[in-house]
Amino acid sequence: MGAPPGYRPSAWVHLLHQLPRADFQLRPVPSGFAPQEQEYQQALLLVAALAGLGLGLSLIFIAVYLIRFCCCRPPEPPGAKSPPPGGGCVTWSCIAALLVGCAGIGIGFYGNSETSDGVSQLSSALLHANHTLSAIDHLVSETVERLGEAVRTELTTLEEVLAPRTELVAAARGARREAEAVARQLQELAFWRGVPLSPLQVAEDVSFVEEYRWLAYVLLLLLELLVCLFTLLGLAKQSKWLVIVMTVMSLLVLVLSWGSMGLEAATAVGLSDFCSSPDTYILNLTQEETGLSSDILSYYFLCNQAVSNPFQQRLTLSQRALANIHSQLQGLEREAVPQFPSAQKPLLSLEETLNATEGNFHQLVALLHCRGLHKDYGAALRGLCEDALEGLLFLLLFSLLSAGALATALCSLPRAWALFPPRNPSASCSGSHLSEPLFPARLETGPPPRSFPGCRRRPH
């Protein structure tokens, strides 16, 4: 079973599909998509656990750095007036972290948009397929009901009118049998009637999940944007309470970034396994959920010359039966109307029913061809395996950049804190090195520091 026309696995799918997989015992696991198997589930959980390991290492590194900075600094000699070195390094480290964070936010918004577009394309394809299946069901029901009404009324009336002529009654009864045969054949064409799996329900479930996924990522992006703003504002104003707020938010967003990274990585690996060869899994799953025969499902999912139309025989028999009814009605109109004028009205009504039935039949032939539903199938795969997967990879990059930027910012904050000037007048007048500004002269945005009235220059 090859890939369907209109969809080919992308390079990202091939690359991710080739990555090695292992279960909790580190035993190799095949890369075929098998979410129902425990070993495959463990492999995806192990991929997600790598992000948890990265989070743990990041927190350990930050904690060790902060402990070393706070507890292992050499004591300053008494009377030292020179500012501690590294103010410019702290400044540019914070600026670099902010730039990386802003780049990650832009990548995150793009990835979120791409993922949303892919899921929207998937939902649209499912809705269009549901419309096609509903149209088939509606046409079959309408045609069968129309033929049944014709059999019960017009043909019954015609037999009563033509009762004196047994050969004409036999022709009318022949048309009745043909109409009943067409109705039976058409009822078998509504293959999705009574199936518990509805593409509409699947599309609604996908849209529901996507709505909350989109909202969660937008909130995460906004949180990181607030962290960047608080960092910039705190450094510009040299406000320690803003730095405290920024530290708490940075730790929260750092945990969320690593958590989303694990979820994105596991989803991307699983999606690549599915997209590398989707036909087999979808055929088996749909057959299990719907109970339809493999011939019908293979015809619509594969739509190639190797699979014949499973409804072709019924369509051929129905077309022949309609042609027989038409010829019988024409014969009755030629022979019966001159002798039985009252037979003209039911015959005209039967002709109208036959014309409507033939119109519905041609629409059914077009809808039952595999082109339409297979086009929806290809569109759904392209939306899920191209746009959504690409957006997911951009979101993975966003989470990675965010984690790196936040870790850098958290390591730079203690040095920035030490360079902030004191807020009390006595400390400002003492000439302490803590009054050294954090930003260089060209980066200072606020007015020059104000001298206090009680401060006097100390004599040298």
Image (tube, helix red, strand yellow):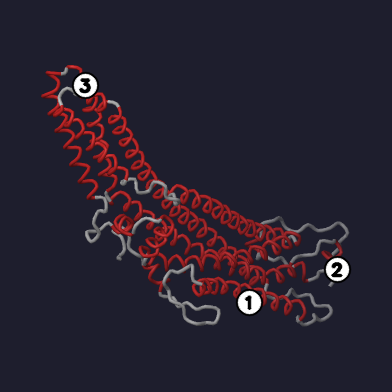
* Separation of residues labelled 3 and 1 (CA atoms): 93 Å
Q: Position of residue 358 (x, y in %)?
A: 23, 36
Residue identifier under label 2? 458
Mark 3 to mark 2: distance in Å? 129 Å
Q: Residue at x 45, y 47 (%)?
A: 200
Mark 3: few/some/many CA within 10 Å (<14, 14-19, 20+): some
Of circles 2 and 1, the one toward us is 1
Q: Residue at x 87, y 64 (%)?
A: 426
Q: Quadrant of residue 305?
A: bottom left
Residue placed under numbered mark 1 in the picture? 57
Where residue 291 appears, as percent x and y from the top left, is 40, 56
User: Do callouts 2 and 1 mark residues in contact (Cβ within 8 Å)?
Assistant: no
For this rendering, which residue is in front, 164 or 332? 164
Relative to the observer, which residue lies in front, 403 or 458? Answer: 403
* Residue shown at 28% from the left, 51% from the top: 370
Three-letter amino acid code of the residue under disc 1 = Leu
For marks 2 and 1 on the same chain, the one whose residue lies earlier in the sequence: 1
For marks 3 and 1 on the same chain, the one whose residue lies earlier in the sequence? 1
Above/below status of 364 relative to 205: above
Q: Say what secondary structure mark 3 lies in.
A: helix
- Which x, y percent locates residue 311? 26, 50
Q: How many marks?
A: 3
The residue type indicated by label 2 comes to Arg
Q: Residue at x 75, y 62 (%)?
A: 240
The kind of residue on which mark 3 rests is: Val
User: Is the Cβ of the residue at disc 3 closer than 8 Å to that at disc 2?
Assistant: no
Q: Is residue 257 above or below residue 129?
A: below
- Residue 104, how many percent across, how many down? 54, 62
Q: Earlier in the sequence, mark 3 or mark 2?
A: 3
Q: Secondary structure at mark 2?
A: loop
Circle number at residue 161: 3
